[in-house]
Image (spheres, helix red, strand yellow):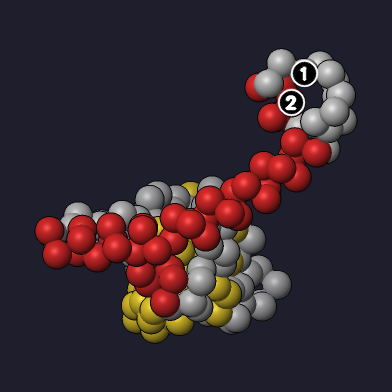
């Protein structure tokens, strides 16, 4: 038979709850204790961490650069979350008080983790990306050169690649 029960706020995966419910309607049918173990369905996009609802939100490279508003299905329904311009991997956007309820009675946060995905592109879009690539190439090569010279001057990975042992810069060797 079916029995409706109220799950209290703050219950987490693996919690065990006990409820007193009416027993059989026949002889000796008083109350019985119903034991319920809570299981949270796994998702590739959502997980819970200390009452915070953590969501992986796919965004395109252009949305990462220019910023975007993404729609996220949260505990209270659909939310619009602003992803700031120049979003990089590992950055999170936190919406305070929109996560799950904790046992303490305080509500957790909604933590949106943008994941930059490469979209399937048409010929026109590919040509635009090639144009962007050409304009970025010189800037990136200068930037990489500075970073690699810095690593080399500190005795980093470049020294190993060039056959130097334990040197501190280009002159050791």
Q: Are marks 2 and 1 in contact (CB under 8 Å)?
A: yes
Left or right of 172 in this view: 98: left
| Relative height, residue 33 to residue 84 (above, below) | above
Do we see residue 110 in this rendering? no
Query: Where residue 38 appears, x then y in whole percent?
Result: 47, 53
Q: Residues within 10 Å of mark 2 (few under 14, many from 20)?
A: many
The residue shown at (71%, 43%) is 149
First along the sequence among labels 2 and 1: 2
Question: Which element type, helix, strand or loop, lies under badge 2?
Answer: helix
Label 1 residue SS:
loop
User: Residue 19, position in %: x, y?
Assistant: 50, 61
Q: Horizontal and vertical percent for residue 108?
A: 61, 73
Residue at the (37%, 72%) spot, across then down = 63
Q: Name the residue under label 2.
A: 159
Q: Which residue is drawn at 31% across and 54% down?
A: 118
Total number of numbered discs in the rendering:
2
Comparing 89 with 158, the one in front is 158
Instruction: Left or right? Give the position of 123 relative to 75.
Output: left
């Amino acid at each position: 038979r079916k029995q409706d029960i109220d799950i209290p706020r703050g219950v987490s995966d693996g919690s065990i709850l006990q409820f007193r419910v009416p027993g059989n309607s026949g002889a000796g049918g008083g109350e019985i204790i119903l034991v319920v173990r809570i299981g949270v369905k796994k998702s590739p996009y959502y997980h819970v961490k200390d009452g915070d609802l953590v969501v992986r939100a796919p965004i395109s490279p252009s949305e990462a650069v220019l910023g975007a508003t993404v729609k996220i299905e949260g505990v209270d329904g659909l939310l619009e979350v602003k992803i700031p311009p120049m979003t990089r991997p590992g950055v999170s956007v936190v919406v305070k008080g929109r996560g799950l309820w904790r046992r303490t009675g305080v509500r957790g946060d909604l933590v949106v983790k943008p994941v930059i995905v490469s979209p399937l592109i048409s010929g026109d879009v590919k040509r635009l990306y090639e144009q962007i690539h050409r304009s970025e190439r010189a800037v990136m090569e200068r930037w990489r050169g500075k970073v690699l010279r810095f690593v080399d001057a500190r005795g980093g990975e470049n020294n190993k690649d060039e056959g130097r042992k334990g040197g501190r810069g280009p002159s050791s060797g």
